[in-house]
Amino acid sequence: MNFEEFKNCGLRRSLDMISGKWKPLILFNLYEDKEIRFVELWRRMPRVSKKVLAEQLKQLEEDQIIQRIEVYNFPPEVYR
């Protein structure tokens, strides 16, 4: 198999979707808790910036690995 064939391989595509510094840790945390708020996930990963976490989550959502659900509550809920 040459490189061009491997480039379009399903395994290669899958590895590209979950590779990176933070995606495996994000997926691990989401596996532990199926539904988790952004801030709670960010608190579990203290070395990642909110911007990077949001970008990684957006990529995972675009690749249809995770699903984002917006919940509008009034008044806003606060968890401690």
Image (cartoon, rainbow, N blue to C red):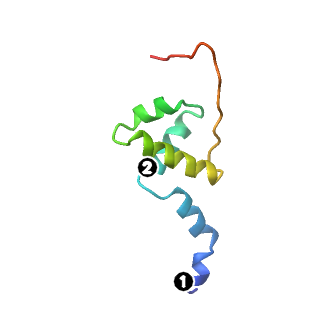
Q: Which residue is mark 2?
A: 22
Q: Residue at 62% of width from left, 73% of height from top?
A: 9
Local crowd size for mark 1, using a 10 Å CA cut-off: few (<14), some (14–19), many (≥20): few
Q: Quick one: 10 or 59, which is closer to the camera? A: 59
The residue where tag 1 is placed is: 3
Look at the picture and state if 41 lies above or below 25: above
Mark 2 surroundings: few (<14), some (14-19) or many (≥20) residues within 10 A: some
Sequence-wise first label, 1 or 2? 1
Q: Nearer the viewer, residue 7 or 74?
A: 74
From the viewer's perspective, tell me whether residue 41 is left or right of residue 72: left
Say what amino acid the circle numbered 2 marks. Trp
Residue 44 position within the rendered picture, expressed as x and y whole percent measured from the top left:
41, 34
Q: Give the amino acid at mark 1.
A: Phe
Q: Judging from the image, what secondary structure is the residue with disc 2 in?
A: loop
Asked whether, in this view, residue 22 is left or right of residue 37, the answer is left
Element under disc 1: helix
In the figure, is residue 28 to the left or right of 70? left
Which residue is most to the left?
47
Residue 16 point in image, percent of width and height: 53, 63
- Mark 1–mark 2 Cα distance, whole angstroms, equals 27 Å
Q: Quadrant of residue 37?
A: top right
Left or right of 1? Residue 46 is left
Q: In the picture, which quadrant includes the C terminus?
A: top left
Image x and y of residue 73, in percent:
64, 18
From this viewpoint, which residue is outermost toward the bottom? 2
Residue 64 in the image: above or below residue 42: below
Q: Residue at x 56, y 47 (%)?
A: 58
